[in-house]
Image (spheres, grey):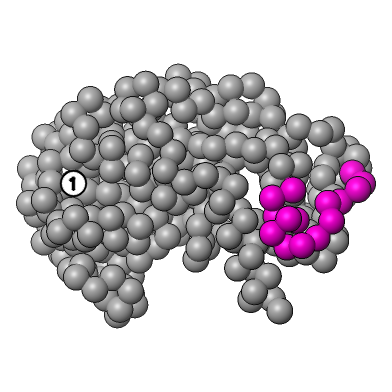
Amino acid sequence: MRVAITGANGLLGGALASLHLARGDEVRGLVRNARRAADSLPGMRVFEGDLAVESSRLTDFLDGADIVYHCAAELQDPARMSATNVEGTRRLLTAAAGRIGRWIQVGTVGVYGRPRNGVITEKSPLAPADAYAESKAHADSLVMELSSVGNFEYAILRCCAVIGPGMPGRFLYRLIGLLDRGFFAPIGAPGALVSLIPVANVAHALNECAMLPQAAGRTYNLADQCTVEHLMEVCCNALGREMPRWRLPEAPVRTVAKLAEWIWPGPLTRAQIDVLTSRVRYSTEQIRRELGYNDVMKLEVVLRDLAIAWRGRST
């Protein structure tokens, strides 16, 4: 089987590449840094390129691929999000026409906005609340539109925050660091839910989207949740620290966050407060029912390992 992976040297792309290389599949990876990818994933054929820029190499990268996993995306720089996540996806889709079997799109549950409570399903309305989510919602619509023109199948997997060793996100590490120093306290009433998903589970779900015929033309949500209190308990146990014994009232913290965004952007934002006080649950019923998906890694195991690894680096 020929497999093409964009962002193959990232957390998720690397997990997919390793999975398919272990099976003996022919794996191609589109990356920004070819040397780093070649060193970390021997056996993968590396294509260097930037989705935000026109490239003649896209055709060679895609030609004859049975499966294309589109993992690459700009997450940090809003100025590059449209060029990479939207126009870059459009370039790939155009180059894929008549050349591939199935396109697997890595999406985000952020396209549903930032609801405060309730259950989100695949039928929930889209309401992206930031530039990244807007760009990903647009990219998903391009996949649905251009796959029919290009005569290839597609499936879309919308994930919550993906975690694992080497993850680029700093928010969870910052929280672990605050717990280790005794500077973190939960916000608002108990029972808020944090949505996280181990990278191994996402790679497993994406592979099912790629291999199972019933996934063609479908969109699935994938997330795992635990309460903020449970997250603290797992991390504190791994760190050898006591659980925080006090809580912060939500309204004053939001006021402080709003002022902080004006005065000193970065350390404390309303979006971070949303994450720590949300009571939204993302349903995985559809992917479990239609594809028989089951977790291959427990969220608590990954949280514990990340906390231990952070402690080891900080000592």
Which residue: 51% across, 25% down?
283
Residue drawn at x 83%, y 42% is: 187
Answer whether residue 197 is magenta in the image: no
SS label for mark 1: strand
- Image point (54%, 37%), residue name: 224
Check the image and report above or below for 144 versus 312: above
Query: Can residue 224 be seen in this snapshot?
Result: yes
Q: Quadrant of the C terminus?
A: bottom right
Q: Which residues are magenta?
A: 233-247
Q: Closer to the camera, 152 or 215?
A: 215
Q: Which residue is mark 1?
A: 67
Is residue 271 depicted above or below 235 in this figure?
above
* Image coordinates for residue 78, horizontal then vertical, percent: 52, 56
Circle 1 residues within 10 Å: few <14, some 14–19, many ≥20: many
Please give the name of the residue rendered at 60% of the width and 28% of the height, measured from the top-left corner.
281
Q: Report the number of discs.
A: 1
